[in-house]
Amino acid sequence: MDANQVAELIRAGLPEAEKVEVTGGEGKFEALVVSPQFAGMNAVKKHQTVYATVRSQIDSGEVHALSIRAFTPEDAPNA
């Protein structure tokens, strides 16, 4: 599984996401996700929401680690 495939899974699970960037490889990835869906969620809930999009890949071992930075559009860094 590569970073593009992980990004596509996140986009499919969070269709409202304005930005999904995934880097990494060999089962270890970092994701930046910006979505209005995160409004009102604390950091743990945001991460759980993103993890749910790749849960089967985590369970199967295709994804070993996923570091997540999740923001609403209002809180997203300007990078």
Image (cartoon, rainbow, N blue to C red):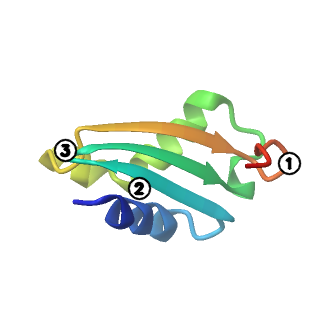
Residue assigned mark 2: 53
SS class, disc 2 = helix
Asked which secondary structure carries label 3, the reply is helix
**Residue furthest front as drawn:** 79
Within 10 Å of the Cα at label 2, are there few (<14), some (14-19), or many (20+) other Cα atoms? some
Check whether the beta carbons of the residues at disc 1 and disc 3 lie within 8 A of each other.
no
1 or 2: mark nearer the eye: 1
Whole-number angstrom distance, CA of label 2 to CA of label 3? 12 Å
Which amino acid, mark 2? Thr
- The tag earlier along the polypeptide, 1 or 2, is 2
Q: Residue at image x 46%, y 54%?
A: 22
Give the mark nearer the N terminus: 1 vs 3. 3
Q: Quadrant of residue 5?
A: bottom left
- Residue 72, given in percent of the width and then of the height, sits at 75, 48
Q: Counting residues from the N terminus, which is met first, the one under dot 2 or under dot 3?
A: 2
Residue 45 rendering spot, x and y as whole percentages: 58, 35
Q: Which residue is mark 3?
A: 59
Q: Give the left or right position of residue 47, taking residue 67 as reference.
A: right
Q: In which quadrant of the rendered image does the N terminus lie? A: bottom left
Q: Residue at x 17, y 51 (%)?
A: 62
Q: Residue at x 34, y 53 (%)?
A: 54
**Residues at marks 1 and 2, CA–CA distance in whole angstroms:** 23 Å
Residue at the spot 23% in from the left edge and 53% down from the top edge: 57
Q: Is residue 49 left or right of residue 5?
A: right
Alpha carbon distance from label 1 to label 3: 32 Å
CB under 8 Å between discs 1 and 2: no
In front of the other: 28 or 44: 28
How many C-alpha atoms fall within 10 Å of the one at disc 1: few (<14), some, or many (≥20)? few
The quarter holding residue 43 reads top right
